[in-house]
Structures are given as structure tokens and as C-alpha cells.
Image (spheres, rainbow, N blue to C red):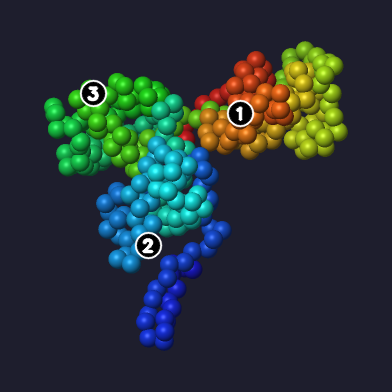
Amino acid sequence: YHKGYESLIVNGSILCQVSVFPKLAAPVPSKGHALALNASRRVLLQELPPDAADIVRKVVEAIDPSKTLGELMVALALPLGTLQRVAEHLVYWKKARIVEAFTPEKRVVVAPGLSSTSKFAKEFQDWHTENRVSSRGAPLTFSEVLAAFSGGRTLKEISENFRKEKAADFHHVLEWLVTRCLLMQLTTYIHFLPNKRARDDYRAPKSVCHVGLEIRTMFCPHVVNEDELKILAGRSENSRELKFFCRFIAEFVRPHVRVDGCKFEAMFKSADRMPRNHKHDLTRKEAEDLLHANSDIFVPYICRQ
């Protein structure tokens, strides 16, 4: 595996080199993740050997940090498993990386220490002069780009405020910044802080919310201890809410997983599609409202990623 290929003799006379890599060595992106290239698309396509599978070329040409694998699956008419396999291959060879999709609601900032005098300024000007979509007006300057993508605004706000005659260039500039790891998402995480006041204000669980054996077996004491479980039960109107609290702590708080990414969204997909009287889990809106109502113990904080 250290060579990255294996030599095979076909029909006793034709030497073939087959690319290989350990199946468990590369992370598998989910349907909600996106891919970002680590080099320019043109360079990567030129690096592909002449006998590279057409499907790899199609995926490289279509990779877009703002599109999820689910969207690429529809656009390319490819099974998710095939896309994931190509993604694993590209990630393993460090030609691409897995990212949270840069969708319009994501907040972004430029990388720390980046300035208009950095080495990337000339690289951007050369790239933009050659690749700009709009020919109207003067080319964008690197200073303009840094100013536009600073401040923690959403990509939707940035695109709307982009220089009007250069609006067509927004997506290409976004992709250029992401490819070079110059743009970072502001991500939201949650701390579970059952402080002394929360313990003192403990309310007995509502009559409809009893801490059943199932919840206790699933979450206590390895996720929450007995005191924490009592506090959560006192904040719950029913067992659905209590189970959500415990599951949220297990899947997002303890492992330090962002709550504005594809994993949090996937948590509610089945519940959002079910009729209300058949729901066993909370919908996303119900969960967000519940967390907001209990923000004294579920404390949000923001990090760069």
C-alpha cells in the first residue's frame, strides 16, 4: 500500500498498474457532507492518468463545496455508494477533503492572519484575471474579497452584498478560497452545564414524564448521572423530550459535535416526515425550541472550523 498501486500481468503479457488503498484508511462522507478540492480542478484533471475511469473525471468536474453528496448524486445520476467510493479515493490521496457544505445559511470568516499583503494576493489576482466570469468593470482585488468574507456574515448576505457587477464571480471566488483553506465556517456547539442553580431549581418530573427503564438503561450513568437525569426529567413535558435531551447529550454534547451541520439535520429527517400523531421523536423545530427554552443549561458557543 505504501506505493499506492499494485502491478498485475494480464494474459501473461500486458503489465497494468492498479491503484489501491486501504479501505478503512479514508473517512466515508455522508449524504449531507460536501467535498472540497485541495488543488485547482484543471491541475487535478491533468494529473489523472489517461486510463482513469470516466466516473472519476465526472466527479472531479462536479465537486463543489456548496453541494452535498446527495445533490451530486442527483446531478450525476450516480448511486451514493459509488460517489462515496470515489470520494474515499480522492480524500486518501489528499486531492480532496470532506467538509460541511458551504450553504447560504453558513457563517464564514477568513483564516486568521490573512491580509491583503499575503502571498495569496498575487495568486488571486493572476487567477481572477484569467478566470473571472464577468468582464464588466475592474477585476476584484484581494482586499475586496477579504472585506466581503470577513465579519462572520452568512454566505447569503455576502453574495447579496458582493459588488453588483461581479455577482457572477461570487461562486468561483468562494470555491477558490475554500480550495486554499482560506475560508472557515463559524460553527455552533453546545455545553451541557447543569449548574448549582439548575440543581436547586429542580422540578419534579411532570406526571406524563416518568424516567422509564428504557431511558435509564440507554443513558444512565454512562451519558448522564442520576442528578443530571433528574434535572432533565424536570425540564421535560414527556418522555419524547427527555429521550431527546439524553440522546442530544450523547451524540452532540459529549463528543463535541456541531449542531448546525448535516449530522444534526439528519437526526430529524424521519421524524419530520411522519404524521404528528405517529411521531416518536421530536421534529427539528420542536428540538430547537426546547433547547432555546433551556439555554441556561444547554449553553451555545461558537468556534471557527
Residue 69: x and y in percent read 46, 44
Q: Nearer the viewer, mark 3 or mark 1?
A: 1
> What residue did someone put label 1 on?
272
Q: Is residue 21 above or below residue 249?
A: below
The tag earlier along the polypeptide, 3 or 1, is 3
Residue drawn at (45%, 46%) of the image: 73
Secondary element under disc 2, as helix, strand or loop, is loop
**Residue 149: which quarter of the image?**
top left
Q: Amino acid at mark 1?
A: Asp
Q: Which mark is residue 118?
A: none
Q: Is residue 88 visible?
A: no
Q: Is residue 71 visible?
A: yes
Gap in angstroms between the C-alphas marked 3 and 2: 40 Å
Q: Residues within 10 Å of mark 1 (few under 14, many from 20)?
A: some
Pointer 3 with pointer 2, Cβ within 8 A: no
Residue 16: x and y in percent read 39, 76
Q: Is residue 226 above or below residue 32?
A: above
Residue drawn at (17%, 42%) of the image: 130
Q: Nearer the viewer, mark 2 or mark 1?
A: 1
Gap in angstroms between the C-alphas marked 2 and 1: 39 Å
> What residue did someone put label 2 on?
53
> What residue did someone put label 3 on?
163
Q: Is residue 164 left or right of residue 299?
A: left
Residue drawn at (63%, 38%) of the image: 255
The tag earlier along the polypeptide, 3 or 2, is 2
Secondary element under disc 1, as helix, strand or loop, is helix
Q: How many marks?
A: 3
Q: Amino acid at mark 3?
A: Arg
**Residue 244: which quarter of the image?**
top right
